[in-house]
Image: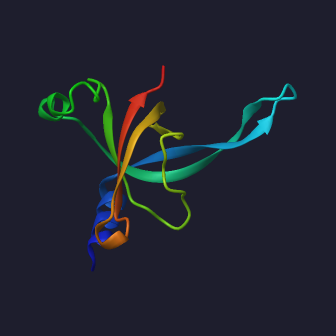
Amino acid sequence: MGLKERISGFIAKRGQAATLIVPGEPVPDGYGGFEPGTPTEHAVTVVTTAYTSEEMALYGGLIARDDVRVYLAPDAFTPAPTTEDEIRIGGTEYRVIRVAPMAPDGETIVFDMQVREDG
């Protein structure tokens, strides 16, 4: 069993249900601009953890006190997350602040995401 399969299995076994919300394609607003299209929702399983005080200090204020670290395993049915997306975990919606794919040898084995509560 490879590293990708181990991580995916761990997230599936220990994770929690979440929804990745991907914005729809922009549509003309009739005034020369665009409005966001209808978002699509993708059911995913994630593992979440808090950032340590050391990580917050190391990144010089780029990580807010209530930011959450989210690990999402890639699959064939879910688009890769971007900073344009949102994610709903346990009824709370978060904005995606940062996405760092872990991709040894060019194959993404997990997405390490920094998310912040929307609102």
Q: Residue at x 21, y 32 (%)?
A: 59
Q: Residue furthest front?
A: 32
| Residue at image point 53% right, 52% down | 43
Residue depicted at 49% across the width and 56% down the height: 80
How many tags in the picture? 0
Q: Is residue 9 above or below residue 47?
A: below
Instruction: From the viewer's side, name the closer residue of 60 and 51.
Output: 60
Please say if 101 is above or below 24: below
Along the line of sight, which residue is nearer the eye, 34 or 40? 34
In this figure, which colouring scheme has been used for the structure? Answer: rainbow
Whole-percent x and y of residue 102? 31, 59
Horizontally, residue 54 falls left or right of residue 81, namely: left
Depth check: give the residue in front, 15 or 26: 26
Q: Is residue 116 above or below residue 44?
A: above
Q: In the displayed image of the protein, which residue is found farthest to the top?
A: 119
Q: Nearer the viewer, residue 56 or 6?
A: 56
Is residue 90 something one can see in this rendering? no
- Image check: 81 left or right of 36? left
Q: How far from the left and from the top, in percent, is residue 28? A: 82, 35
Residue 66, given in percent of the width and then of the height, sits at 30, 25
For residue 28, side relative to residue 86 (left or right): right
Q: Does the image show residue 51?
A: yes
Position of 30 with respect to 14 (left or right) is right
Q: State the image coordinates of residue 91 (x, y, percent, origin top left).
A: 48, 33
Identity of the residue drawn at 19% across and 30% down? 56
Toward the left, the furthest residue is 54
Q: Residue furthest right?
A: 30
Q: Quadrant of residue 29?
A: top right
Q: Quadrant of residue 49?
A: top left
Instruction: Work out which quarter of the rendered image holds the N terminus and state it.
Output: bottom left
